[in-house]
Image (tube, coloured by chain):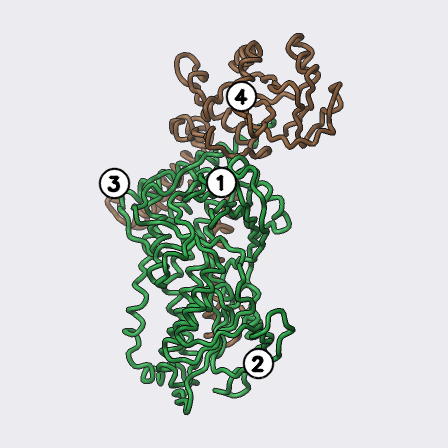
Chain colours: A green, B brown
Amino acid sequence: MASVALKTFTGLRQSSTEKPHFVTQTKGNPNPQFRRRFYVAAAKTSPKIAGRNLRVAVVGGGPAGGSAAETLARGGVETFLFERKLDNCKPCGGAIPLCMVGEFDLPLDLIDRRVTKMKMISPSNVAVDIGRTLKPHEYIGMVRREVLDAYLRNRAAENGANVINGLVMKLELPKEQNAPYVLHYTSYDGKKGGVGEKMTLEVDAVIGADGANSRVAKAIDAGDYDYAIAFQERIKIPDDKMVYYENLAEMYVGDDVSPDFYGWVFPKCDHVAVGTGTVTHKADIKKFQIATRNRAKDKILGGKIIRVEAHPIPEHPRPRRLAGRVALVGDAAGYVTKCSGEGIYFAAKSGRMCAEAIVEGSENGKRMVEESDLRKYLEKWDKTYWPTYKVLDVLQKVFYRSNPAREAFVEMCADEYVQKMTFDSYLYKRVVPGNPLDDLKLAVNTIGSLVRANALKREMEKVSL
Amino acid sequence: MSSMALFSPSSHLSTLSPSSHHTNHFSFRPFSSLRTRNPSSSSFFTIRATADNGAEISGASAAVAVETPVEQKDPEPAKAVLEEQNSLAGTNGSVTATEEVEVVSKFEDPKWVNGTWDLNQFQKNGSTDWDAVIDAEARRRKWLENNPESSSNEDPVVFDTSIVPWWAWIKRYHLPEAELLNGRAAMVGFFMAYFVDSLTGVGLVGQMGNFFCKTLLFVAVVGVLLIRKNEDIETVKKLINETTFYDKQWQATWQDENSGSGKM
């Protein structure tokens, strides 16, 4: 146990050298056509497209699809963005890191709440305030997904993407090289509540951004991933109770709340979202939800449940995220972090990164793309974010595995240095190398906490109440 | 396991008078007692309980000093304490089992004051009896595992295991094992030194200045620490598998590029 904890922090230092994302792309590949000749033996120099631009379908209009479509449309690609339900409010925590606001140029009025305080609450109800190290301008944004998604879609449309209100039923793969993909979809455009019209569309490439139950992934035989189930209740609580949650989010850990994740109370626009998640004990999710509500009992007393939601959360990427000219992004690919379960930023980012690869590979929509062009997106993605995912995976494995580990985790979070590091890495998605002396202190303290908590656990096994 | 009882006011009173009586009726849970928790007026009852049952509490804390069970008290005279495990429900006379009031139990102990263990009550021969603190905390956590408690901002938990000095933990958990480990480490170290000497001709003193030998020493110490029992080898193996599992899940995408097959 102890040695694993130590590894966590050394890993955090060594591997997290994330570079600024956009600068590298053009630099690394100044002449795509020239490079391509040497790239894969099977790939020919892609032909120019005559009389039209490259056509790309983006299936799914969430953050991943919206940002992908925007980038494509800006890059001169003829873009079709499919979304089945334009006012869909997805069950989602809705937390976005600060850097997303800048990178995606989001208007500030999208953000309902600015969370500046986090409370971690251990199994024995030790509560630790995180966020004391935040600077005045720093916060975690809380958004409503219906608002964010609609905004990103509209911006894609403004840039020239065709937003289609339709449900993609089937993706037909081409038999020959460079032949188009055929999308079969049911269009609901124009009439609300109608049966819909069956239609087809030919495109040159497809970005699958259609979430956990992705049809695109099925079409390219991308394989499955393990998923966690997240359960969330939106509860309207009395105004005097809401004051407490003004800018504060709570995280509950413990075997009662979830055996491998955490329970949360997040502030939303005018209510709170209370939820929990689990991978290993999906059948017991209701029980965990009751436990979460019980732990927050006094603080949400008198609340009225206005909405109940459940959603699968991918645990790891699909075995195959790419096939031919089809690429998966966001939840469809499985880009959700362990430990924190964060997905919005990574979805939007992967959508954009994939679109950038297509724009570049097609020379702004003038040429056909091929698998090797899309591969560049995967390469870059894994290189940039793999350390982040890995660190969070190790954190989850070390600290969420048992109640003593969780106690140690909460104890550790009381440390200001830890808070600074976590918030910096969360808000800006980069890890600044810390002070080695502080790191060492942190490692020693963590091991101390873990040892103490496990010692108590051994004692607890002896006790019979 | 905690077994709960349903109390009625009459049975509550009966516990106050004859001390022999309660042995039949109450499940003993050292250091903890149940109380009814009415969310709106919980703090009120906390005060009430100490006021009403003053005599009982003094008796209880006296008993705690020699680590004997504390009797539980029902601070709310009118309502019955209701719990999942009411195995003793039948033993008390007037049981109102039909009362469907949601009641949440809260950890209670005379030594648990304002969200922490009152160290003044853990004095033994002029110094704090840390062993007793560890015992008490273990019991509390065990109890909480079975009866998760609502968190509260008015009544926060401030106890931190780091207030127990490190030697208390070592004394308690490490010493019995330390003999074995020290012995093992010494033997491993001795024979390593012997082999290195016989193979390379570098003496024990010379080895200390050698980087390679220092590394070996480190490996030996870590090995002895990690592998205390034979089962530990399996555990370490499992741990390594677990840590590389996620890597494999991520690398799956890149395998089909090399092997040509789409499957993992």
Give the residue at mark 1: A239
Bin the neighbour count of mark 3 within 10 Å (Cα to Cα): few under 14, some 14-19, many 20 and up.
Answer: few
Q: The residue under label 2 is which amino acid type?
A: Glu
Asked whether residue A93 is in view, the answer is yes
Q: Is residue A334 above or below residue B120?
A: below
Bin the neighbour count of mark 2 within 10 Å (Cα to Cα): few under 14, some 14-19, many 20 and up.
Answer: some
Q: CA distance from mark 3 to mark 1?
A: 74 Å
| Badges 3 and 4, same chain | yes
Residue A108 lies left or right of residue B228; in this view the side is left
Q: CA distance from mark 2 to mark 3?
A: 75 Å
Q: Are marks 2 and 3 in contact (CB under 8 Å)?
A: no
Q: The residue under label 3 is which amino acid type?
A: Val
Residue A326, position as x, y percentages in the image: 49, 76
| Badges 3 and 1, same chain | no
Rendered image quadrant of residue B2 = top right
Q: Identify the mark at residue B46; answer none if there is no mark.
A: 4
- Determine the chain carrying the residue at label 2: A
Q: The residue under label 1 is which amino acid type?
A: Asp
Q: Which label's residue is closer to the chain start, 3 or 4?
A: 4
- Determine the chain carrying the residue at label 1: A
Q: Are marks 3 and 4 in contact (CB under 8 Å)?
A: no
Q: Are marks 2 and 4 in contact (CB under 8 Å)?
A: no
Bin the neighbour count of mark 1 within 10 Å (Cα to Cα): few under 14, some 14-19, many 20 and up.
Answer: few
Give the residue at mark 2: A172
Q: Is residue B196 above or below residue B32?
A: below
Q: Secondary structure at mark 2?
A: strand
Observer-side mark, 3 or 4, equals 4
Q: Point out the image quarter for the N terminus of chain B.
A: top right
Residue A12, position as x, y percentages in the image: 35, 52
Q: Are marks 3 and 1 in contact (CB under 8 Å)?
A: no
Relative depth, front residue between A299 and A54: A299
